[in-house]
Amino acid sequence: MEKFAFKNREAALILVTQEISASELAVYHHRLHALLLVINGLSCQQVAGLLGEDTRTIHRWLTRFEEQGLDGLHNAKRTGARPTLTARQMAEIRRYVLKNPGRLTSKSRLSKWDGKLLSEYLNSKYGVVLGVRQCQRLLTHMELPARVYDQRT
């Protein structure tokens, strides 16, 4: 039988690779295929070459399978970094921001909350140092009314 010739091999490769990494189930099946190929006699290096993976990755999957069975082929739960502020603190901050409209500016006008003001408040109240941009994201996440939060800054 003749070798199949793709019209655009690179595009097909990118499409299939993206599809494999698009879901946990597809990643799991990809690892099952790697395991099956090694069980049928291919080396980790050969399988890595066929599937576009690193040899150490294939070996790690096999080790996890040997130690944990099929569960070892699933991704472990990732916890991520701990939040800087607790849920209770976030609730306190939201209540405070809603009750206190902002600060007086040099022109004796009341300004709305912005990232800089929240950053200063968090540092003075909780000893937490967050950047202005991160505080802007927090304010957006709090879903505050427009009268309280200046989204332009």
Image (cartoon, rainbow, N blue to C red):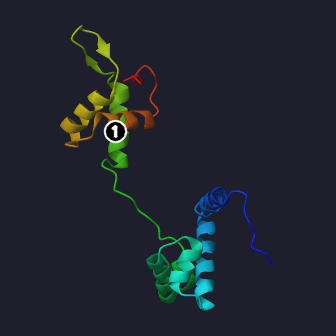
- Is 46 left or right of 107, judged from the image as shown? right
- Count how many numbered circles sit on residues in the image: 1
Amino acid type at image mark 1: Gln
Q: Quadrant of residue 56?
A: bottom left
Q: Quadrant of residue 106?
A: top left
Q: Is residue 108 above or below residue 118?
A: above
Q: Quadrant of residue 15?
A: bottom right
- Is 92 left or right of 141, judged from the image as shown? left
Q: Is residue 113 above or below residue 82?
A: above
Mark 1 lies on a secondary structure that is: helix
If the image is split into quadrants, where does the C terminus sit? top left
Residue 28 position in % (x across, y down): 59, 72
Q: Is residue 116 above or below residue 63?
A: above
Q: Residue at x 47, y 82 (%)?
A: 59
State the residue in front, 55 or 143.
Answer: 55
- Is 84 left or right of 43, judged from the image as shown? left
Q: Residue at x 62, y 58 (%)?
A: 10
Residue 146 position in % (x across, y down): 45, 22
If the image is split into quadrants, where does the N terminus sit? bottom right
- Residue position for label 1: 134
State the residue in front, 147 or 68.
Answer: 68
